[in-house]
Amino acid sequence: MITNKIQSNKKLIAIDIAKSFGSEFPLKSLDITPWLYKGLLLKEDLFREGINQHNWQEYQKSYLCIEINKDALIAPWAYMLLVEKGKRYARDIFFTNPLKAHVQLIKMNIDEADFSVYKEKYVLLKGCSNKSVTPEIYAYITKKLIGIAKKIMYGEACSFVPVYIGQAEKQT
């Protein structure tokens, strides 16, 4: 009988980050440039008119990514107004582009996870799972696992790169 040593190893846990911590988030973007004078300057009456005429219901059950030109001059109260309107409908609001918001959402899910299940285990972070998992996310989860996992590897069970080896493992 042929035994799959990888699957039968109870100490090895393979993590598909996209499946475990999310990869599909309903993200919708809003560019507020038209609500600014000449696209760069905040004028309260123009800004409030844009907010009041906008269809905020389109963000129902989505994550709202409000994109703002970095050269625009915007007072802090304007961000507060955007949150007040958007939070009525959106799951959450990010002041960045959808890609950066996606990374933040996966990080939030990682932060909420119970990492004690990886204590003294060999952890394989699957490398070919999903394009939505950025190098930043791999680095983030690695920081969480260091000191908990016995060993951290990247790749697939048949071909992996060792990334971290705990002190107890180094001594054996």
Image: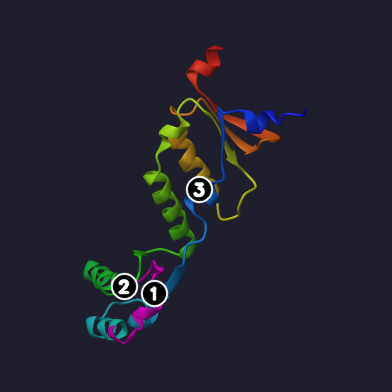
Answer whether labels 3 and 2 touch (C-beta < 8 Å). no
Q: Position of residue 157 (x, y in %)?
A: 66, 35
Looking at marks 2 and 1 on the same chain, the residue that comes earlier in the sequence is marked by 1
Which quadrant of the view contains residue 49? bottom left
Instruction: Identify the image quadrant of the C terminus.
Output: top right
Instruction: Identify the image quadrant of the N terminus.
Output: top right
Which residue is the extreme one toward the front?
Answer: 1
Q: Residue 20 carries which label?
A: 3
Question: How far is disc 2 from disc 1 in space, using C-alphas?
Answer: 8 Å
Which residue is the extreme one toward the right?
Answer: 1
Looking at marks 3 and 2 on the same chain, the residue that comes earlier in the sequence is marked by 3
Dot 1 falls on a residue whose secondary structure is helix
Which quadrant of the view contains residue 11? top right
Q: Residue 59 carries which label?
A: 1
Looking at the rendered structure, the kind of residue marked 1 is Tyr
Number of the front mark, 1 or 3 = 3
Answer whether labels 1 and 3 touch (C-beta < 8 Å). no
Mark 2 residue crowding within 10 angstroms, few (<14) / some (14–19) / many (20+): many
Q: Which mark is residue 161?
A: none
Q: Mark 2 points at which residue?
A: 86
Q: Position of residue 72 (x, y in %)?
A: 35, 71
* Start-end of magenta stretch: 52-73
Residue beneath the point at 56% across and 55% down? 132
Dot 2 falls on a residue whose secondary structure is helix
Question: How far is disc 3 from disc 2 in space, using C-alphas?
Answer: 28 Å
Mark 1 residue crowding within 10 angstroms, few (<14) / some (14–19) / many (20+): many
Question: How far is disc 1 from disc 3 in space, using C-alphas?
Answer: 25 Å
> In this view of the protein, which residue sits in the foreground, 172 or 140?
172
Looking at the rendered structure, the kind of residue marked 3 is Ser
Q: How many marks?
A: 3
Residue 27 within the segment the image draws in magenta: no
